[in-house]
Amino acid sequence: MGNYKDLFSDEAKAKIKEMAEDIKMCMFCTELGVRPIPTRPMGVLNVDDEGNLWFLSSKKSNKNFEIQHDNEVQLIFAKNSDAHFLSVFGTATIYRDRAHVEEIWTPTAKTWFEEGKEDPDATVIKVTPSDAYYWDTKDGKMISLLKIAVGAIIGKTDDGGVEGRLNV
């Protein structure tokens, strides 16, 4: 990518929110010191204005068990169609109360929780970002690809991309 731009505080939180809400799915990694790193796909159900990412999870899942022993996690987002990529390191907190479940519940969650919002296994995981890194395009994927093609012909190296740290 051609440009480097770190973002700080509110701007960094807004970038996390923008990208996570756009991409929606991530690879949720736990036990970061173990090899291979336990990883599973998860859908983000909410991103608040502080950049916290919210998920539904079963209290019986390996993920919840792993978080109880080591709450440092990594979330990896990728949307190849638009060349948007985001890596978030953070601290996971598990909530077991119904109020948190109801707040982020979606009808599709019933696929995993037979009793719906009242399912006793339903928990909420909040990931509070501590460090993040993004790769993005300024003009969209098609324009970036065109810039790469033109750059190859004329010897210019700007692909229209931007990357940087997100310091929350």
Image: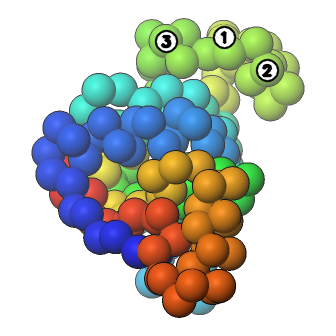
Q: CA distance from mark 2 to mark 1?
A: 14 Å
User: SS for tag 2?
Assistant: helix
- Amino acid under disc 3: Glu
Image location of residue 134, percent across then percent down: 41, 61
Q: Are marks 3 and 2 in contact (CB under 8 Å)?
A: no
Q: Residue at x 74, y 23 (%)?
A: 109
Q: Which residue is mark 1?
A: 118
Q: Nearer the viewer, residue 85 or 114?
A: 85
* Residue 129 - label: none
Image location of residue 20, percent across then percent down: 51, 41
- Amino acid under disc 2: Thr
Residue 86 visible in image: no
User: SS for tag 3?
Assistant: helix
Q: CA distance from mark 3 to mark 1?
A: 12 Å
Q: Earlier in the sequence, mark 2 or mark 1?
A: 2
Residue at the left extreme, as displayed: 9
Q: Which residue is mark 3?
A: 103
Q: Nearer the viewer, residue 166 or 69?
A: 166
The nearer-to-camera label among 3 and 1 is 3
Q: Residue at x 45, y 18 (%)?
A: 100
Q: Residues within 10 Å of mark 2 (few under 14, many from 20)?
A: few
Which of the 4 image quadrants contains residue 85? bottom right
Residue 5 visible in image: yes
Image location of residue 7, percent across then percent down: 21, 54
Which of the 4 image quadrants contains residue 72? bottom left
Residue at the front extreme, as displayed: 154
- Amino acid under disc 1: Glu
Rendered position, 38 above or below 78: below
Q: Earlier in the sequence, mark 3 or mark 1?
A: 3
Image location of residue 139, percent across then percent down: 52, 49
The nearer-to-camera label among 2 and 1 is 2
* Residue 108 - label: 2
